[in-house]
Image (cartoon, rainbow, N blue to C red):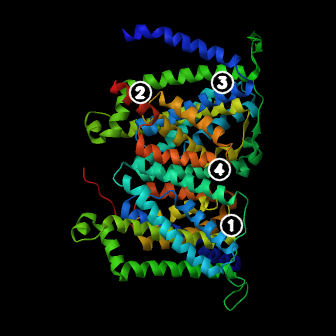
Amino acid sequence: MNQLNRWPVWVIFGLGLIVLPFLIKDFRVFQLSLMLIYAIALLGLNILTGYGGQISLGHGAFYAIGGYCAAILMDRFGVPYLATIPVAAGVCFAAGILMGFPALRLGGHYLALATFALALAMPQLLKFKHFEAFTGGVQGIILMKPTPPVEFSLFGQPLSEDRWLYFMVLAVTVIMFVIARNLLEGRIGRAIVAVRDQPIAAGALGVNLAVTKTITFGVSAAFTGVAGALGAITVAFVAPDSFNVFLSISFLVGVVVGGLASIPGAIFGAAFIQFVPNIADQISKSAPWAVYGVFLIALMYLAPNGIMGIINRRKKGI
Amino acid sequence: MEAFLLQVLSGVTNGGIYAAVGLALVMIYQSTHHINFAQGEMATFATYIAWALIQLGLPYWIAFAATLVIAFAGGVAIQRVILRPVEKAPVLTNVIVFIGLLVIFNAVSGMLFDHTIKVFPSPFPKEGLLISKYFSGHQLGSTMVTLAVLLCIFSFLRFTPIGLAMRAAALNPDSARLVGIKVSWMLAIGWGFAAAVGAVAGMMVAPIVFLDPNMMSGILLYGFAAALLGGIDNPWGAVIGGLIVGVLENLLGAYVIGTELKLTVALVLIVAILTIKPDGLFGKTVVTRV
């Protein structure tokens, strides 16, 4: 019954998402697209850390790999931008599996440490002079924003490049969230959670621990890689120093703020990491990070399950 | 041959600094089984305090001592206020709190002392008895200072009653509590020492790499590698691991891969040690009961 009653809400919500970009300025549309992109990345990290219980402090590295994949394919090989997204997903899946193998032997702190090292080393790897022919070295790669395939106006606002990108990102976001939901609420999702909570019992029930953990890592990296590719297309620029360790940390902040092991939490987390720094930036250059740090620690004490935890508690209370 | 010797000796100097960072990590790991991801940023912040004190006109060594005291107090305070409530919480909670600390220290360093790169003075003479083409004054001095600090820590842990209590608290917290040791305070003192050792590493490395809020991130990575190589629960191991990693880094940098991939070397080292020999060279093998 609930399902039936809710559909008008969803229709209005969907229409709102379509109309919204025509009501605001191009730059705001760009920020909204970035928020959606971060939501996909956070979803990826949440699959691994929230559902899988494996801590990664290095997901910025997979975001970077996805971004560079898209940028190199578009810039050096002239691949159309939409085609780069599945390639980025595939490459990051492979990279995730590769990182997943050592992760099998590393629990808790050690995995956090290894991925932290990955995040710290990533900008240096991207600057490496022997890859410069592809990566453009320190300068990075400058791309062209894709032109919209159709021309029309709504409320007197044309379908600009940024608005077109918004719709493209929105479509991919919806697809990724549906994939994540189907994956996590089915048999595979239950296996992932079982491996997190009771590895021995899960093994006894026939869940292959090693395969599940490695695949979780791969899938998680693939989601973040898709986000990275979308990010490169939307920003139209990649450079090594934008993928430093603080990118990985802001992903962690987003997951914790939105709520661990929660799919809709990714949206709240993404809104937080996209818009809070903009507000805090007006105080001072370092303020956003101080705010992040305080939020991280305060949330661990007050609301370990983030915004979704608070919402769920409210629902149960009623 | 001479160039080779030069590389080895300068590796030993860096190794001393990695050893100090590694030791700070081990001191916290030993007693709490947590890896302090904020160690590097804490050390940087302490170095900024030293810099500010020197700017105020204090002589170097007084500023040095004052910084150690402040770092020690700060370490104890962090443990008492921020980490004690989550002592028994899951690993993820702890990692997130450490990352929170890292970010806060980094931001506060930037806010108070701004992001411009600062020159940090070296207290050691440019010329002297042992100073030759192999060793600059600062290299020699900083190696001596790190070794002296390590020696102090070891004698403290080995020969004083508080040191004994700290080792007991780390080894077997329950029994230690039964014989009247305040285990939680011992952890706090351990944190204080770790912060002070980190501060020494920061002050010794700052004249070489210059002072900015991200100064320690690479060094922290090598500190991790040092601690892991020596066995993360073994203080001596961390020191030896630090020296090995320092020399290895320099030789690899000079002869094999160049200096641009130094952090990648640390990454490969860390992943390799963790997958091939997670107990390190001198650590004890951890057995989990199922």
Type of amino acid at the residue the image marks with label 2: Leu
Picture residue at 37% right of the left edge, 53% below the top: B85
Which residue is at the front of the view, A277 or A243? A277
Q: For marks 4 and 3, give the CA distance.
A: 38 Å
Instruction: Determine contact: label 4, label 3, CB under 8 Å.
Output: no
Q: Mark 1 Cα within 10 Å, few/some/many (few <14, many 20+)? A: some
Instruction: Determine contact: label 4, label 1, CB under 8 Å.
Output: no
Which residue is at the front of the view, B135 or A294? A294
Tell me which label, 2 or 4, sits earlier in the chain.
2
- The residue that mark 4 highlights is A286
Q: Quadrant of the N terminus of chain B?
A: bottom right
SS state under label 3? helix
- The residue that mark 3 highlights is A83
In the rendered view, tell whether residue A219 sits above or below residue B30: above
- The residue that mark 1 highlights is B209
- Disc on res. A159: none
Mark 4 vs mark 3: tell me if same chain: yes
Type of amino acid at the residue the image marks with label 3: Ala
Q: Mark 3 Cα within 10 Å, few/some/many (few <14, many 20+)? A: few
Q: Which label lies toward us, 2 or 4?
A: 4
Q: Could you tell me which chain the residue with mark 2 belongs to?
A: A
